[in-house]
Image (cartoon, rainbow, N blue to C red):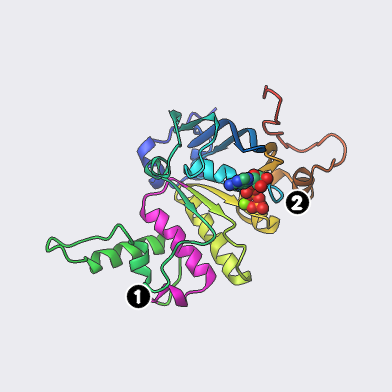
Amino acid sequence: MADSIVPPDDVQNAPDPALEKSAEPLLRMVGITKTFGAVRALTDVDFEVYPGEVVGLVGDNGAGKSTLIKAIAGVGPADQGDVFFRGQSVKLTTPQISTHLGIETVYQDLALCDNLDVVANLFLGRELYTHLKTLDEIAMEKEALRVLQILDVKLPSLRTLVASLSGGQRQSIAVAKTVLRNAKVILLDEPTAALGVAQTRQVLNLILRLREQGLAVVVISHNLADVFDVVDRVIVLRLGRRVSTFDIHTTTPERVIAAITGAEFGPANPEKTQSGSVSGGNPA
Ligand SMILES: Nc1ncnc2c1ncn2[C@@H]1O[C@H](COP(=O)(O)OP(=O)(O)OP(=O)(O)O)[C@@H](O)[C@H]1O
Ligand SMILES: [Mg+2]
């Protein structure tokens, strides 16, 4: 068994996803539970994502996807459960803690400033300054260009106002911003929901670029075509429980849909379909 070790601080620079697959999860959550009053949004959910891996998080409306993302992002901490980052126990009780660990979330509203250009958006709140305490526009442009090239993001100009960019380009800027902040885990909530075909392609390519960089990427999506295009594993939530986990290469959209809806699918599954930590049961 290959006992590959990813040096903890080099995750972003280790470009070989195959090598990293056997590493421990970058982020692992065990027994996550979250209630809102009488509503049990998450019940005993386990979750893990590896460096250089794209995980699809799917499930019907109300399944608990956003609640899980918010627990990871620290904006809606879990009531119960254990979290490990690079094997170390952590408590994701505030957004600052998650951000500090390199966990970054791109929500659908993107939080970009339309009236600012690309560079200003990328460095908003983290501007670079010259020794004369003026904005170091050249340094910011260089750094912006470097990251946008790594991610293969095509823009008319770095000085274009974000308001005039396409949806896909805006999504790309929001993701590039997290990469500039040195993200290790990127959570994308419905990144292609509002996009057309070409723009969707652009964002899916971007996700593959993130994986190449050794980042751990979690994508919430209702679009199974997108999921099958870019993810390595699919984790299915239903009614707040993790009900199935699929290796994308050995499953079919029909099976994933069956897991999402709770429909039985055929006889005993001949494919390598690991059933995830099905609620209530103790994973062997
Ligand atoms: N702030 C809240 N207060 C009360 N209930 C909530 C809150 N947030 C989520 N819930 C409930 O928790 C459950 C899971 O919601 P969640 O938003 O995580 O689902 P989801 O999988 O993201 O769904 P969708 O696909 O519609 O975005 C739902 O029953 C929802 O009504
Ligand atoms: Mg949601």
On-image quarter of the N terminus: top right
- Tell me the residue at 52%/62% (across/down): 109
Side of 61 relative to 155 (left or right): right
Residue located farthest toward the left when viewing the structure as drawn: 132
Amino acid type assigned to the residue bearing label 1 in the image: Arg
In magenta, the rendered stretch is 157-185
Q: Position of residue 133 (x, y in %)?
A: 15, 62
Is residue 119 highlighted in magenta?
no
Q: Which residue was labeled with disc 1?
A: 159
The part of the image, by quadrant, that contains residue 119 is bottom left
Residue extending furthest toward the right: 267
Residue 71 on image: x %, y %? 52, 41
Q: Earlier in the sequence, mark 2 or mark 1?
A: 1
Q: Residue at x 55, y 32 (%)?
A: 79
* Residue 65 visible: no
Q: Is residue 253 toward the left or the right of residue 180 in the image?
A: right
Residue 253 got which mark? 2
* Left or right: 161, with 248 as reference point: left
Residue 139: give x, y in percent of width and height: 24, 64
Asked if residue 152 is positioned above or below residue 100 in the image, the reply reads: below
